[in-house]
Image: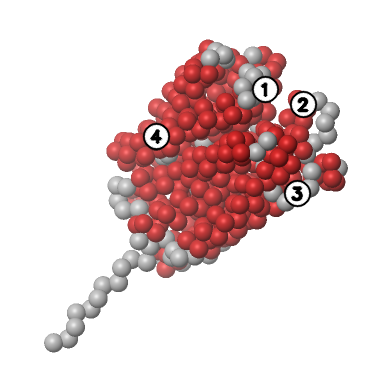
Amino acid sequence: MSPQPVSTPPLNSKGRVLFASLIGTTIEFFDFYIYATAAVIVFPHLFFPASDDTSAMLQSLATFAIAFFARPIGAAIFGHYGDRIGRKATLVAALMTMGLSTVLIGLLPTYDSVGVLAPLLLALCRLGQGLGLGGEWGGAVLLATENAPRGKTAWYGMFPQLGAPIGFICATGSFLLLSDFLTDEQFFAFGWRIPFIASALLVFVGLYVRLKISETPAFQKTLDKQERVRVPLVSILTDHKAALLLGTICGLATFVLFYLMTVFSLSWGTTALGYTRGEFLPVQLAGVVFFGLTIPLSALMSDRYSARKVLLWTSIVIAAFGFLFLPMFGSGNLWVIALFLVIGFGLMGLTYGPLGTALAELFPTEVRYTGASMTFNLAGIVGASLAPYIATWLATNHGLAWVGYYMTIAGILTAISFAAAGFLSHHRIDISRSAAGQ
């Protein structure tokens, strides 16, 4: 009697896929957020001429914005290879680009040592961070969603999104610990460098996990059928212009909300509102916990009702939330401010959790890496790159209420775009069915 053949388990197990998609984005966002935190509390003092505090802060926030303009370039570069040679190799390259740039920031000389060369080197490393994250996010989302079973796409797609709150908690927590254990002199002398250099250990872990995964089934089918597009970006710009435009605006409220809740609130809270880092960072950290908690909730809702519907209604609520900016964030009561941040970060989880799934659904498999990455990162330019700068200018010149109006406008535009994206999706399906019937 011949032995029964042993069935081979799938190369990409559920646990391996979800962990690989989560660990990479956690590392990437940890790197990204330690820069965001340092851009507010460290870089204005160490990397820019000590003229006046406001000018130094605005210059520092300008370097923060550089990465958002680099991210679409990274999306185009890494997206091209992700759609041509596969998701796995591209994800490894993106993580290495981001990780190396972050470690180098921790080794940079300051303005007192090398003068104007210091902010130039800082800007160059920030550019590298942007290129890496531009290629990372789309690939991680596709790694998850293209391995998802039917009816679980949003649930799988939310694991890369969980990297954002986890990375933020780790980044903020590291600066909080450093503030507790080091004096201000020690912190500004060497302590701020520790998170940047230590991120190298996390990168090695991420690379090890990523190298263990295989290509996604959806992209493998594209390879087998020889359906790859020669230049995915050209295809996006010629055949999927409407999806690119709508997808970009669909991410607007997500980015505006997040960077108002993080970079702007920390900057304004520790300057104009007069709170210390030790007082404000724990409050912000508590808000991020709710960011993490509402991401799984949004995924469950999206698998039941569709990601687009969840995002449309959440955008409407974000628009209404903007009117609470002055009465709550400007209340002068830390408990009220904490509640404001909890609500804001909770809405952030609801809008961020299904976003990757919704953007990926706008594009076919053969250009999905490029399309999803481009829309997400162009939304970063429109919604996040200048959000702290714009909010600081509005609050300084017109008051906090105008920062809230800024958020409200972003929410309204995003809701309209999701409604239009739904129409586009139904129209494309109708065309496909008509073509299939001919």
What is the spatial separation of the Cα atoms under label 4 and label 3, in whole angstroms?
Answer: 37 Å
- In the picture of the structure, the residue carrying the numbered disc 2 is 53
Q: Residue at x 65, y 52 (%)?
A: 197
What is the spatial separation of the Cα atoms under label 1 and label 2, in whole angstroms?
Answer: 10 Å
What is the spatial separation of the Cα atoms under label 1 and label 4, in whole angstroms?
Answer: 30 Å
| Figure quadrant of the N terminus | bottom left
- In the picture of the structure, the residue carrying the numbered disc 4 is 294
Q: Residues within 10 Å of mark 3 (few under 14, many from 20)?
A: some
**Residue 60 location in percent, x, y?**
73, 35
Residue contact at pointers 4 and 3, CB within 8 angstroms: no
Q: Which mark is in front, 1 or 4?
A: 1
Q: Residue at x 43, y 29 (%)?
A: 346
Residue contact at pointers 2 and 4, CB within 8 angstroms: no
Residue contact at pointers 1 and 2, CB within 8 angstroms: yes
- In the picture of the structure, the residue carrying the numbered disc 3 is 108
Task: Identify the amino acid type marked 3.
Answer: Leu
Visible in this render: residue 307?
A: no
Secondary element type, mark 4: helix
Indicate which disc, 2 or 4, sits on the residue closer to the N terminus. 2
Secondary element type, mark 2: helix
Q: Which mark is in front, 2 or 4?
A: 2
What is the spatial separation of the Cα atoms under label 3 and label 2, in whole angstroms?
Answer: 22 Å
Indicate which disc, 3 or 2, sits on the residue closer to the N terminus. 2
Along the viewing direction, whichever of 179 and 425 lies nearer the viewer: 179
Indicate which disc, 4 or 3, sits on the residue closer to the N terminus. 3
